[in-house]
Image: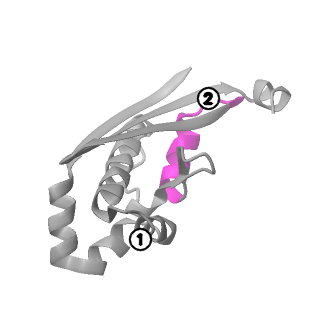
Amino acid sequence: MIIGIGTDIIDGRRIEAVLNRHKDKFAKRIFTKAELVAANETANKVYFLAKRFAVKEAVYKALSSSGITGCSWREAETLNGLNGAPFVNLTGRCKTALETITPDGYKAKVSVSLSDDRPYALAFVVISAVPADWVKSND
């Protein structure tokens, strides 16, 4: 079952402008160390970070029904798996919000899709839940 959906689109030129204006201060406030390391290994750091910024916004929207506010930017971290597919790690208030909207006896999964068509970057997040006993029997 779907328990949350969020989407966000951002103009990458906005991220580029703030990165140029505030250098590391902005990046360190918004992105995790792992996100910044990964960004530095890409050909286009600006659009890599723009997509991750959009994920953070989309995650907050998907979690909005929890009633929990004050999620930190770094509590929604987007990394890439060995196959290159993005995945999201939630910590702090974001994790608490996820636990709040997840029905008893269910296990939540955060799925993310990223895209860009410069100058825009887009993130789409779906939070789904499956019975916990189904997860254990299908691992």
Residue 70: image quadrant is bottom left
Which label sits on residue 103? 2
- Residue name at image x 55 percent, y 40 percent: 100
SS at badge 2:
loop
The stretch of residues the image draws in magenta is: 92-106
Q: Secondary structure at mark 1?
A: helix
Task: Mark 1: give few (<14), some (14-19) or many (20+) Cα within 10 Å.
Answer: some
* Residue at 38% from the left image edge and 39% from the top image edge: 64
Quarter of the image for residue 6 reads top left
Mark 1 vs mark 2: give the one in front.
Answer: 1
Above or below, comparing residue 33 to residue 111 in the picture = below
Name the residue rendered at 43%, 69% in the picture.
Answer: 36
Q: Amino acid at mark 1?
A: Asn
Residue reaching furthest to the right: 137
Discs 1, 2 touching: Cβ within 8 Å: no
Q: What is the x, y in percent for residue 97?
A: 50, 45
Per the rendering, the mark at residue 40 is 1
- Residue found 61% across the figure and 45% down from its top: 83
What is the x, y in percent for residue 49?
Answer: 34, 59
Residue 62 versus residue 34 in the image, above or below: above
Residue 12's x, y, as percent?
A: 21, 54
Instruction: State the residue lying farthest toward the top.
Output: 1
Helix, strand or loop for the magenta stretch, by majority: helix
